[in-house]
Amino acid sequence: MKSVAINGYGTIGKRVADAVNAQDDMKLIGISKTRPNFEAKTAVEKKGYDLYIGIPEREHLFKEAEIEISGNVEDMVQKADIVVDCTPGNIGPQNLEMYKEYGVKAIYQGGEDHNLTGLSFNSFSNYDSSYGADYSRVVSCNTTGLTRTLSTLDPLVDIVKVRAVMVRRGSDPAEIKKGPINAIVPNPPKVPSHHGPDVKTVLNGIDVTTMALLVPTTLMHQHNLMIEINNDITTDEVIDILEKRSRVLVVDASNGLGSTAELMEYAKELGRNRNDLYEIPVWRESINIVGNELYYMQAVHQESDVIPENIDAIRAMLKMEKNNEKSIDKTNKAMGIL
């Protein structure tokens, strides 16, 4: 049983903590918070998680809020076999020095630059690269979404070039001070966006160019893919390979799943924790081949699609499972992923 610590208990951290807690081959030994808010209180009182303080000088604030603490973040790190770092992006480099000092492996999130670890991770495309590694980075929600479907299609489709337009949510649901209110914002206002180069850190040999914009929604991202191909395939073959791939859902707009809002409602109907949709939904109606180009549209639940990847990264880096498909299957079963 491997010991896992979660440094940072926000949007991603709390989801990774619950996912670790659902596995039978790893143990959550603690989470860290810098503020004594409702998330900290719920983690301790409702979930029974050991809480460690990210900023020791704030210990009195936790005591005033009557939230039990188990020590500071360095105490937690020293007990762990691996740390999943879910802290804000500017904190990562200094945390890396702490992990190195205590000889603890660490997984970062897509908000950090690839150069921080020199290694990025996706369960489908490059699991082996992080096997036994000390430090790696699970790529961002958008990169995970692109890589899931592109790596699935790659054995079938002779891909010449990928072009993708990323329609991104303006902010997460709880971020009340962020995001466009009545605007569509090129983000960034240049081509290519960073998403294409990020895909190349985990999926070699794919020529991909992306552009992105922010829109006034908090629910999900949406991707529009145009893929130049060099072989004869049919739409049915594309649909078939996507339907067989776990963590990818081919959905029908005609069945009431024609929008991101309806996809989030579907997650509720599945009874998911926090209404999360870990899978990447691809609209069946959008899958089409015109001449030498394959088209499709997909959605990404930015709060949750990277969570199973973090669990697989733990198994790879701690050498708990050599075969990526076995890890994927184990994670899926524990989390109820389709």
Image (tube, rainbow, N blue to C red):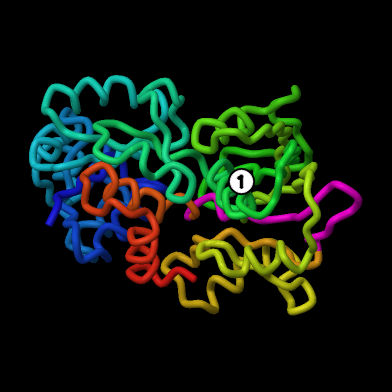
Residue 34: percent from the left, percent from the top? 27, 37
Residue under the point 70% across and 39% down:
214
Which residue lies at the image location 75% right of the left edge and 40% below the top edge? 165
Q: Of residues 200 and 34, which is closer to you in this image?
A: 200
Q: Is residue 89 left or right of residue 299?
A: left
Q: Which residue is mark 1?
A: 146
Instruction: Name which quarter of the figure residue 58 lies in.
Output: top left
Decide whether residue 66 is among the magenta residues: no
Q: Residue at x 54, y 79 (%)?
A: 269
Q: Start and end of the magenta stretch?
A: 286-304
Q: Quadrant of the N terminus?
A: bottom left
Q: How many residues crowd around disc 1 within 10 Å: few (fewer than 14), some, or many (20 or more)? A: many
Could you tell me residue 186's position as x and y percent? 75, 31
Q: Given the current orientation, which residue lies at the most extreme right position? A: 291
Query: Looking at the rendering, which quadrant does residue 77 occupy?
Result: top left
Q: Amino acid at mark 1?
A: Leu
